[in-house]
Image (tube, helix red, strand yellow):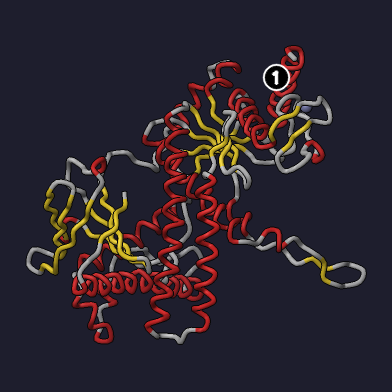
Amino acid sequence: MKSKFHPSVQVADILSQWVGCARVIYNAKCDEDKYLRTYARKYLPVGTWPEVDKTYSQFKTDLTSWLKDCPSQILRNSATIWYHTYQRFFKGLGGRPKRKTRATGSYIWLTQELFRIRWEGRIAFVDLGTVKNPVGTISVRLSRKRVPNQNPKSIWIKKTNAGWSIAFSYDNGIDLEESTSQAHLNHLKTLDESTLLSMITPVDRGVARPVQTDADYPFQFSEKDKAKFKYRDKLVRRFQRQLARQKKGSGQRKGTLARIAKLKNKDKCVRENFWHQTTRKIVDNSKVVVIEDLKLKNMIRRPKAKVCAITGKWEKNGARAKAGLNRSLLVAGLGQFEQFLFYKMAMANKPLFRVSPHHTSQECANCGHTHPSNRKTQSDFECISCGHSDNADHNAALVIRKRAVNLILNSGTELTSTHGNVLRLRANANPSKTTAEKSNVAMGCSSKKKAA
Ligand SMILES: [Zn+2]
């Protein structure tokens, strides 16, 4: 839960310094690690790796005397964040910690010794600094629903061009990296097909309809929201043109930067709100959720350049079609959707599965026939084999559900735990079991054909 706040000039100056010092430590740890790994590779026996630890005092030198003005807890916490990121990397949950920039690393983590909170109704007065060295107070106004009945364990403060924000962090005792989906799956395997079909909520994600479940209606931004996105995008472009003409370091330029940041922040808030509401609705109204195992990074990656083999000339590679602000924003949103869905499902103790996204848009949910020409247009689906017609995204959602049911019932399903509670459902490479899966598909199909 994130809230805006407006610090006084003095407090903002101090916070900015802290943010900068924390980033210096984080980046220094990254550089140190890179250096040590290179050293180990060159001069140490194969398989020897430098130790990953939380030490940071080696960075406090005569050249960085300003680090002494920053409370050591802030520096320690920054090193701890780096350490945790590394631990996640060892578990295969994320990448190695990377150097942060002003845009990606302007935040601090304050643990209990660095703040004290007084409540006055909905307003929280947060005294910053240690008891010995208090630096000032900020006030945060919360909406009535959000006033908690306990004090937070720690707080996160973030600085952007659009202003400051603060997040209170609590310990709810749920370990998001611990998987409970496996236990759920063992139970689901004992159920029959029709029960599973009624229990599973499939989620298809796409460009035209951001989120489509098995329900008749999609989750979509309102027309008003869409119009406002467009309007703000137009303004941002205008300000960016202005920015190009303005002198670097000038006050005018600073103002334009702040205006752009504010508009973008507004967009971000609206989108975040939409994803929060959508995931909340999905989690509350479902027992089991299945999503596609999308490679979101590949969706915004630039396509490879194409060269004609005969003439050696450049050919069209669809880069224009793939580019565009909206697409990258959408992909960013889909990533956020997954994140929100993941932690909300984990908190509700419900299982979340992923299935292969291969050809979900071309497969018929009725008979299983897969062909590119099944999809007539972006929105219409009509099977050329059985004549089944539906909205393309709705059809894809049904295909996802069918796929999940087949994989759950097929005892040869191989499961890999990825990202904590999310399980990836996959057919086993074992041929005998693949046949079992195939017969499953065939049985499901024939019974439906009879019904039709
Ligand atoms: Zn069909």
78 on left or right of 217: left
Nearest to the observer: residue 22 or residue 247: 247
| Quadrant the C terminus occupies | top right
The residue lying at 49 percent from left, 34 percent from top is 352
SS label for mark 1: helix
Vertical placement of residue 451 versus 386, above or below: above
359 on left or right of 80: right
Nearest to the observer: residue 254 or residue 293: 254
Residue furthest left as drawn? 132
- Locate residue 287, reporting x and y percent: 47, 26
Q: Is residue 415 visible?
A: no
Image quadrant of ligand 1 equals: top right
- Locate residue 266, reporting x and y percent: 42, 58
- Locate residue 354, reporting x and y percent: 56, 38
Crowding around mark 1 (Cα neighbors within 10 Å: few <14, some 14 to 19, many 20+) is some
Nearest to the observer: residue 376 or residue 25: 376
Q: Quadrant of residue 383?
A: top right
Residue indicated by mark 1: 444
Total marks in image: 1
247 on left or right of 82: right
The residue lying at 26 percent from left, 62 percent from top is 77
